[in-house]
Image: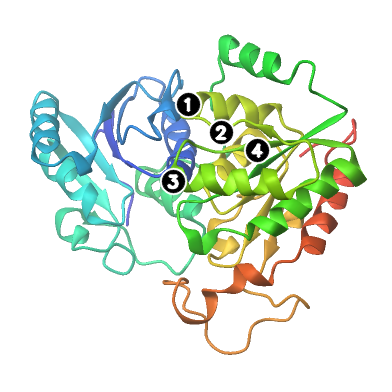
Amino acid sequence: MASLEIPSRRICLVLPSGIGDVVHGLPLVNALKRDDPDRHITWIVEPTPAPLLQHHPAVDDVILFDHRQGLGAALALRRELRRRNFDLLINCGLYFKTVLPTLFARARLKLGYGRDRANDLIWLFVDRLPPRGPRHRQDMYLEFLEPLGVTAEPVEWRIVIGERERAAAAEFFAGLRPERVAGIVTTSAMDAKDWAVDRLAAVATALERDFGFLVVLLGGPGRRETERARQVAMLSEARTVWALGPDLRWLIGLIEGCDLVIAPDTGPLHIARALGTPVIGLYGHTDPLRAGPYRAFQDLTIDRFNLEAEGRPYAGPLEREHPGRAGARHRMGSITVADVLERVEVAIGRYLLPEASL
């Protein structure tokens, strides 16, 4: 797609969820704002990841839209968007929940993905980006800069942590903090991406006993998250500190305060990467080449989607577009406690020394 000649001063970004995807959207708006500080950027987002956008210097306006609330939410969104006009709408979504915002918004041009990547007939409502092969989700979002002639570099997230939030995190760690703090995210958005609780508990035990970490359990307030975290706490010999809760801003502050985070493919993992907190990623159900920590901490990432425990590629074709099917379904189980502790040693040697830097 050639560079666009139309104005792009008022932009509407449709990227409603989840937390990791919204993190990946931040370098896109940063680049747009860096290219033209007078651009006005409106972001349509769901309530759960919306706190990531609070006080963000590249986001001028936030419109909340939860498609699960049905007709009332859709009508409210339509009324809100009918009061605005945009030069450009960018639809980063791949599923039907982004269709209504795209239809309702008044924009001279609406960009989105073609049928090679988007689902649910989304491509019928947008001008389509050229087809591309499989690539990291972050790179997919940055593609929207190309027709605008905007450079993506440097890729930066700039998540804002206020003084109040940073002070709250410091107070939480005060009196608890040994030399190092390790946060464990026990649960992802889907059980196929989760690692076994007994293995998480064994890692927690070793983190305290063998490496001197204070272990903090991180996550949201959901029932499955709470139950799995409780099991980890009960099974571990470590003195785990409970930090699950409903406040995403609180979680962001805690992740920044950790020296190391261990997580499956889930939103907090990508928050950690954006903040520069070393993160050990546990991947078996999804491909870290497409959903891993972007351009960082690959040496800490455990890849069982593409590789067997011995480091050999899996025999036979992988269903990369639908990794939950067939062979990839049970690969989280091939991650061992020893695999994780080996990455802990790497993290200590490369990232936790005073002179270490990204």
Compare marks 4 and 2 and give the one earlier in the sequence.
4
Please say if the residues under marks 4 and 2 sit with CB atoms less than 8 Å apart: yes
Is 15 left, or right, of 88 in this rendering?
right
Give the residue type that dot 1 points to: Asp
Res. 5 in view: no
Indicate the position of residue 339 as horizontal and vertical percent values.
79, 63
Closer to us: 216 or 240: 240
Q: Residue at x 46, y 29 (%)?
A: 246
Is 318 left, or right, of 107 in this rendering?
right
Give the structural element (helix, strand or loop) at label 1.
Answer: loop
Disc 4 to disc 3, how far (Cα)? Answer: 23 Å
Dot label at residue 217:
4
Quarter of the C terminus within the rendering: top right
Label 2 or label 1, whichever lies nearer to me, is 2
Give the residue type that dot 4 points to: Leu
Disc 1 to disc 4, how far (Cα)? Answer: 14 Å
Compare marks 4 and 3 and give the one earlier in the sequence.
3
Compare marks 1 and 3 and give the one earlier in the sequence.
3
Dot label at residue 21:
3
Indicate the position of residue 51 as horizontal and vertical percent values.
42, 26
Give the structural element (helix, strand or loop) at label 3.
Answer: helix
Q: Residue at x 33, y 32 (%)?
A: 47
Q: Which residue is mark 2?
A: 244
Compare marks 1 and 4 and give the one earlier in the sequence.
4
Compare marks 2 and 3 and give the one earlier in the sequence.
3
Q: Residue at x 90, y 30 (%)?
A: 354
Dot label at residue 247:
1
Q: Residue at x 32, y 69 (%)?
A: 116
Q: Is residue 297 above or below residue 287?
A: above
Disc 1 to disc 3, how far (Cα)? Answer: 18 Å
Indicate the position of residue 337 as horizontal and vertical percent values.
78, 61
